[in-house]
Amino acid sequence: MDRPKLLLTTVFGPYGIKNKYAEGVGMQMELFNNQITREQGVHSPRANYWTFPLYFLAENLSAVPTTVLDFPTWKDYIRELKKGYTHVGISFTQQNVIKAKRMTKYLREQYPETNIILGGYGTMLPDLEDIVPCDEICRGEGVGWLREYFGENPEAPIKHPIMHGVSQKYLYGFRDVIDDSGVLFPGLGCTNGCFFCSTSNKFNNSYIAFLPTGESVFAVCREAQEKLGVEGFAILDENFLKMPERARDLLVEMEQHRRPYSFAMFSSAETIAEVGVDFLVRLGVCLIWVGVESKKTIFSKVKDIDVHSLIAELQAKGITVISSSILFVEHHDKVTLEEEINWAIGLGTDLHQFMQLIPFPGTPLYSKYVAEGKMIPDFPYTKLHGQDELAFYHPHFTSKEAGRITREAFRKKYETDGPGVLNMALTVIRGYKRAKGDMKSREEAGLFWNPQTLRYERSTGYQIDEFMNLRIEQMRQRALEFRPLIPSARIFAPNNGSRKKAAQAAALYNETLGKPTLRERIRSYGLVCFATIEWLRIRVRRLFSRGEIVRQPLTCRVEYNSECSNFSPVETSKIPSGLQHRCNLSS
Ligand code: SF4
C-alpha cells in the first residue's frame, strides 16, 4: 500500500440553503442565528466557528501526513482530491448525510482505491452503510481510533491545538475582524445520560477527558495567550463543571500566576448549584449555557433546583445565561406547550434556545419511539434539526404546525425581552457594579475566599483580594466592549418595552462608567450606520421573499506533518490564527 496520506474534511457548502442535499431553516453553519437569536433580525449576532475536532484529530496523528479541509465548496473538495489521498475521512452530522453520500459516491467513482472513513454524529444512523459508501466507520472517540487504525500508539499524550474558535463574526452588520478568544476542548461526552441526548449516548454516557486536570487546562490557556494573545476561551465540553476538582484547580493555577482568563461554557444546573455562583464569577465564567429543558422536572439535572433563582443569581453577578428548553415533549398539549414557552421566557435569561424534541437515532428516545411505532416513516434525516417539522407522531400537534409554533416562540421571547445582545449588555454592567459592591462588603465584613469550601468566609487578618481586583477590571473592560451596541439596540428595537430597556441600559452605563468618551461615541455611531445598512438589506430581502441573509463560513485548508514551505491554502481560505504558528507562512 502507498504511504498513507489522509484528508479530513467537513461536508461541502453552501450551508443553510435549501437544495437537494440539505435544508435551509435550522441548518445554517452558525449557532446564534440558527437557533438562539432566531427571529431577532438585525440584532442577531452572526458567527461561524471552525470545525475544531478535525484540527484536533490531525494534530494528534504523528506519522500520517494529514490535511484538514474545513467548509469546502464542492469545487474545493474536487480540487483537493486531485492532490492524491490514500484515505479520506468525512465528519458529518445526521442532517448532512446526503452531502456525505455525494462526496463518497464521487470518491468511489473517481478514486476507487481511496479508503473512506466516516466519523461524527452522522455515524449514529442505523442504516448508514446502506446510504453512504465507506470502508470504515469511527463511531466513538476519534483520536484513539485513528491512531490505532494507522498503527500509532492510541495512548500517546494528547496534543491540544492552539487556535481561535471563530472564523468570522458580525454584529449589526459590522464584521469584527479581531478575534480575541481561543478554544478549549477538555473532553468528550457527558455522564448525565439524558434520554434524548446524542452526545451522551454516542459515548455510552461516559466522559473522556483530554485535559483531565486544572493544570493541563491552564497550560493550554497559557500557551494560547502567548501565541494568540487571547485571554478568553470558549470551552467545548458538554459539562465542564462535572469535574469540579478540575475547575477548582484551574482557579488555583490562575490565582497563583495572576492570569484571570475568562470562559464561556456549558453546564447543567445541578453542577452550577454544587460549585456555587461566587466560584463561577471568580473562575471567570462570563457566559454559561444551561439546559433547563422543561418546567416539569423530568430531568435529574434540574431536580430540586430552583432554576429561577439560580439563573437570577448568575445574571445578577454578571454571567450571561443562555437557557434552552425542549418543545413538543410527550406531555405537551396546546395548553401545556404554551405554558412551557411562557415559563421559559419567564426565566428572563439573556438568550434562549427553543429546540424541538428530536428522536436522534442512537438515543433511548429513538429506540422507544421506534418500538412504539411513533416515528414518521421515511422522515428525511436532513430534517432532523429541530427547528421545523417533527420526526414523530405527536398526540397533539401535527409535524407541519410545529415549525410555526417554534418560530413564534422565538418571536415571543424577542418581543418580551428585546434583543439578546441588549440583555447581555445589561447583565455585564450590572455584574460589574455588583462585583465592586460585593468586594467592598466582603472587605468590611472580613470575608475572604476559601479555595477548599469554594465560599467567602470570615478570616482573621487583612488580605487584599488582588485576583478579584483583576477580575473586576476585566468585567469593566467587557462592559466597555458592549457599550457601543446600545444605540443600535435602541434605534432598531422591536417595541417600546425594548426601547425603554435600551434607555435604562444607557443610563446605567453612564452612572457606572461615566459618560461615553468621544471614541466610544464614534464607535456607536459607526455601528448604527452598519446596522442601518443591514436592516435595509433584511427589509429588501423580505420584500422580495428572498429569506434572510445567510452567511457562509470561510473555507480553510491546513496541512499537518508536511514541510511548512508546502503550505498552500485554497483561494478562499483563512487559517485559524493559532495554526499560523505551527506553519510559518512567511517561510
Ligand atoms: S446534561 Fe446536557 S450534555 Fe449531558 S446528557 Fe443531558 S443534555 Fe446531554
Image (cartoon, rainbow, N blue to C red):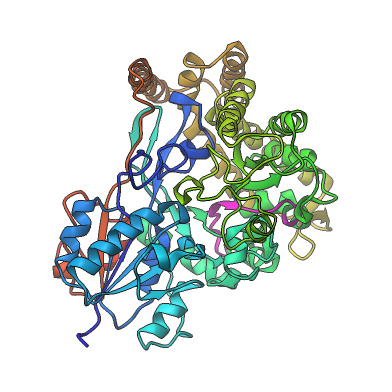
Q: Is residue 416 left or right of residue 6?
A: right
Residue nearest the viewer, comparing 416 with 2 = 2
Q: Quadrant of the C terminus?
A: bottom left
- Could you say where residue 434 lies in the image, as x and y percent from the top left? 70, 36
User: For ligand 1, which image quadrant applies?
Assistant: bottom right
Q: Give yes or no for residue 221 being in the magenta stretch.
A: no
Q: Is residue 416 left or right of residue 99?
A: right
Q: Give yes or no for residue 268 being in the magenta stretch.
A: yes
Q: Is residue 305 left or right of residue 570?
A: right
Name the residue located 20 percent from the left edge and 66 percent from the top edge. Answer: 109
Residue nearest the viewer, comparing 248 with 67 = 67
Name the residue located 39 percent from the left edge and 68 percent from the top edge. Answer: 118
Observer able to see residue 466: no
- Could you say where residue 256 lies in the image, as x and y percent from the top left? 60, 65
Point out the stretch of residues depicted in magenta.
254-271
Q: Is residue 556 above or below residue 88?
A: above
Q: Is residue 499 above or below residue 576?
A: above
Q: Is residue 294 above or below residue 577?
A: above
Observer able to see residue 274: yes
Q: Quadrant of the N terminus?
A: bottom left
Residue 459, by quadrant, is bottom right
- Could you say where residue 504 lies in the image, as x and y percent from the top left? 62, 18
Q: Is residue 102 left or right of residue 465?
A: left
Q: Is residue 180 above or below residue 521?
A: below
Residue nearest the viewer, comparing 452 with 151 = 151
Instruction: Give the number of callouts.
Output: 0
- Could you say where residue 229 lies in the image, as x and y percent from the top left? 39, 54
